[in-house]
Image (cartoon, coloured by chain):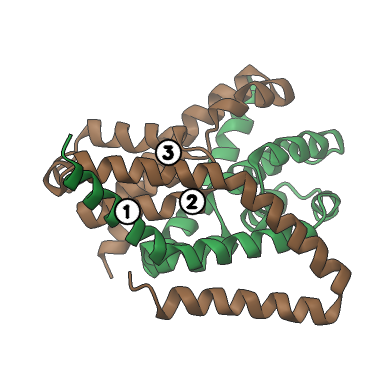
Chain colours: A green, B brown
Amino acid sequence: MDHKKIRSSLKRTGKSFAQTMPILFGVLLLVSMVLVLVPTSFYGKVFTGNEVLDPLIGAALGSIAAGNPITSYIIGGELIEEGVSLLAVVAFIVAWASVGLIHIPAEGLILGRRFALVRNGVCFLSAIAIAIIVSLVVELV
Amino acid sequence: MRPTSGSVKFLAVVVALYILLALYDFVLFQNVLYKFTELFFKVAPILVLVFVVMSLLNLYLQPGTVKKMLGTRAGPKGWAVAMIGGVLSAGPIYMWYPLLEDLKEKGMKDSLAAAFLCARAIKIPLLPMMIYYFGWTFTATLCISILIFSVIGGIIVEQLVKSE
């Protein structure tokens, strides 16, 4: 193996990492803040019972939430037991993993502002579309 | 991306928020800081993994190869690589931005970067948990829908970003 090539590859990766490190640190700090300031009990309190509004609320909540997706499954399971519609819960779970409102500044700085805005917007709408499909299939089966 | 300007400004704004929080409620500030430390040690191994993956890609993948596989002429194989990569990528979404930036610089198209990020909604290690909570039908339909919408979403993102 060519040591020169390895060193050059590590150097290039290190440089790229050094450039993005302030952003990653910033996001980690923001996520930590959201995790402490928004308790999980908050999520159940904002659903209205409205079939049209709740999926939007679910996707919006999932978009601002932060943390491990496993938390979204647990919260989702509890929300269903509390009577929140499956439609809203699916939108919440999908948006949790694919949309990141608090990550948008970082995503924009690294991958481009327009890309970040469009990508998150499309994933937000996809979360609602996926929720409709999953709810229909689960109801039919 | 330039190292200074935007990224440092972003970090400065977040640090300013922390200072405000410390002035407002020091106990809450300590709790948030504790959470940050906890989170940092949790994501550190993923950061190392991303570093290793990026170094290997830098070592073995030439921009021409990336362009051919994930660039404008990418076929089904390119989509499959992006989506499988997204599904397999562990940890928080933001940890993978540097890798995608690197691949984009080498020629990866926006649609595949978007598909990678959308497909991340499927978490293989968490599937048993999802099946436990919501059942097989739910889990299978959700995973298939996410993969289909990763492609649709990727195409839409590409078109909208291009139309700038």
The residue drawn where x is 43% and y is 77% is B6
Residue type indicated by callout 2 = Met
Mark carried by residue A90: none
Which chain does the numbered disc 1 sit on? A
- Where does the N terminus of chain B fall, quadrant-wise? bottom left
User: Which of labels 1 and 3 is toward the front?
Assistant: 1
Give the alpha-carbon distance from disc 2 to disc 3, as whole Å.
12 Å
Quarter holding residue A78: top right
- Do the numbered discs 1 and 3 sit on residues whose CB atoms are within 8 Å? no
Rendered position, A131 above or below B20:
above
The residue drawn where x is 76% and y is 62% is B32
**Residue in the foreground of this view, choosing between B141 and A24:** A24
Can residue A58 be seen at all in this image of the molecule? no
Quarter holding residue B115: top left
Characterize the local packing of mark 2: few (<14), some (14-19) or many (20 or more) Cα atoms within 10 angstroms. many
Q: Which residue corresponds to mark 1?
A: A13
Rendered position, B20 above or below B62:
below
Furthest residue in direction front, as rendered: A3
Residue type indicated by callout 3 = Gly
* Place of residue B105 in the rendered image (x, y in percent of width and height, measured from the top left): 24, 57
Rendered position, B59 above or below A116:
above
The residue drawn where x is 51% and y is 38% is B90
Quarter holding residue A46: bottom right
Q: Which residue corresponds to mark 3?
A: B86
Mark carried by residue B95: 2
Which chain does the numbered disc 2 sit on? B
User: Which of labels 2 and 3 is toward the front?
Assistant: 2
* Place of residue A106 in the rendered image (x, y in percent of width and height, measured from the top left): 48, 65
**Residue in the foreground of this view, choosing between A56 and A7:** A7
In this rendering, position of residue B20 left or right of residue A9:
right
* Place of residue B59 in the rendered image (x, y in percent of width and height, measured from the top left): 22, 42
